[in-house]
């Protein structure tokens, strides 16, 4: 006669057998396949970046400079764009001074132009294609910030921000696009902002330029997918760079206040963006109603 205790022991044994013969191998097998997949992805990316022609606008500062360091270290052939030839020269020297014994690195090619002058942008695109033949990755990074009330801001200031943050980057993209389409290869990146999705007070021109950027590059993505060209819009939150210092104000002058430290605080249906050290021009912390532009337009 089999007792209940003996039956329980047999059942427990079967469960342990099932765990050790089926579940554990399945778990470790899946983890192994996933790790192998990620490793292959990483190796493919490394191989792609090595020798890839990468154009970075706004390479002399902040995000652009950090991208330049990363792509240079990865062995990419860099085209560094900026307005200031001296700053670009210094950056080229700084990058070339970094010793990398594991990677074959290339001396970056500086190209000087002002994004707010579309004629120089088109000439710059020609110069890039002449010097390097093609572009694999275009990073539309350069930009300026704006701080001011709508009522006090002249249209010339709105236009300046729009030309730098929107018309310049799209002019460069349009000028390089035919060559990417011809090769059926390329990756276009637009550095937008959270403000390309959410509008906050006293940043009208900046938020408008970033919303336009988001829309343009979303359209572009849908149009060029057929040519195997990728389009990425990056929407960062606050990063401490020179962007705030160089912001244009309502009268077109440079903001030049102290670098802000930003924090977000929820306040009963509103979000308070506190910016310690940014009160230079009588600016109050910004309180944002929690409405998104997509919700407003529907
Ligand atoms: N910092 C942040 O918190 C965030 C930044 N971003 C976006 O990231 C991008 C980079 O900003 P970030 O690195 O912070 O800012 P920085 O001010 O540090 O760098 C901006 C770069 O853009 C260049 N630039 C500005 N105006 C022009 C122009 N007319 N023609 C050519 N180049 C120009 C500047 O060149 P020069 O040295 O000649 O002035 C500089 O190299 C911008 O598009 C910005 O909107 C998005 C979200 C958050
Ligand atoms: C529960 C949902 C919470 C939703 C919170 C929404 C809060 C929106 C906050 C907006 C953050 C804006 C981030 C902006 C990123 C950016 O572009 O930063 C650079 C600038 O704005 C320009 O610098 P400046 O210092 O001149 O403003």
Image: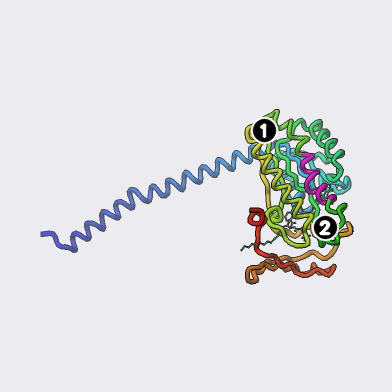
User: Ligand 2 near label 2 (Cβ, under 8 Å)?
Assistant: yes
The magenta segment: 159-172
**Quarter holding residue 146:** bottom right
x, y percent for residue 180: 71, 32
Determine the residue located farthest toward the front in the rendered image: 298
Q: Which mark is residue 185?
A: 1
Magenta: main secondary structure: helix
Q: Is residue 217 left or right of residue 83?
A: left
**Quarter holding residue 145:** bottom right
Q: Is residue 39 left or right of residue 20?
A: right
**Quarter holding residue 240:** bottom right
Residue at image location 82% in from the left, 47% down from the top: 163
Residue where numbered disc 2 is placed: 247
Q: Nearer the viewer, residue 210 or 24?
A: 210
x, y percent for residue 62: 77, 54
For residue 9, above or below residue 140: below
Q: Is residue 173 left or right of residue 228?
A: right
Disc 2 on helix, strand or loop?
Answer: loop
Residue at image location 72% in from the left, 49% down from the top: 191
Disc 1 on helix, strand or loop?
Answer: loop
Mark 2, other Cα within 10 Å: few <14 / some 14–19 / many ≥20: many
> Could you tell me which quadrant the N terminus lies in?
bottom left
x, y percent for residue 294: 65, 54
Q: Is residue 165 left or right of residue 225?
A: right
Mark 1, other Cα within 10 Å: few <14 / some 14–19 / many ≥20: some
For residue 234, above or below residue 202: above
Residue at image location 83% in from the left, 41% down from the top: 110
Q: Nearer the viewer, mark 2 or mark 1?
A: 2
């Amino acid at each position: 006669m089999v007792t209940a205790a003996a039956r329980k022991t047999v059942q427990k044994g079967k469960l342990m057998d099932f765990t050790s013969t089926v579940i554990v191998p399945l778990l470790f097998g899946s983890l192994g396949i996933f790790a192998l997949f990620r490793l292959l992805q990483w190796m493919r990316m490394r191989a792609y970046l090595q020798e890839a022609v990468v154009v970075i606008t706004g390479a002399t500062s902040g995000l652009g400079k950090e991208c330049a360091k990363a792509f240079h270290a990865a062995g990419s052939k860099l085209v560094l764009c900026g307005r200031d030839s001296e700053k670009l020269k210094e950056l080229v020297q700084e990058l070339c001074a970094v010793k990398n014994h594991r990677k074959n690195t290339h001396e970056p090619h500086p190209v000087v132009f002002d994004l707010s002058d579309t004629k120089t942008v088109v000439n710059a695109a020609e110069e890039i294609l002449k010097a390097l033949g093609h572009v694999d990755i275009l990073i539309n990074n350069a930009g300026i910030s704006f701080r001011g009330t709508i009522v006090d801001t002249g249209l010339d200031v709105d236009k300046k921000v729009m030309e730098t943050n929107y018309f310049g980057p799209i002019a460069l993209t349009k000028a390089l696009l035919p060559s990417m389409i011809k090769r059926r290869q390329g990756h276009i990146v637009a550095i937008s902002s959270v403000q390309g999705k959410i509008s906050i007070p006293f940043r009208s021109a900046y938020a408008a330029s970033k919303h336009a950027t988001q829309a343009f590059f979303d359209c572009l993505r849908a149009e060029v997918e057929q040519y195997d060209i990728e389009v990425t819009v990056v929407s960062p939150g606050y990063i401490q760079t020179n962007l705030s210092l160089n912001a244009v104000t309502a009268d077109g002058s440079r903001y030049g206040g102290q670098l802000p430290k930003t924090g977000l605080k929820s306040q009963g249906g509103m979000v308070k963006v506190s910016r310690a050290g940014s009160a230079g021009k009588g600016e109050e912390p910004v309180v944002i109603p929690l409405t998104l532009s997509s919700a407003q337009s529907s």
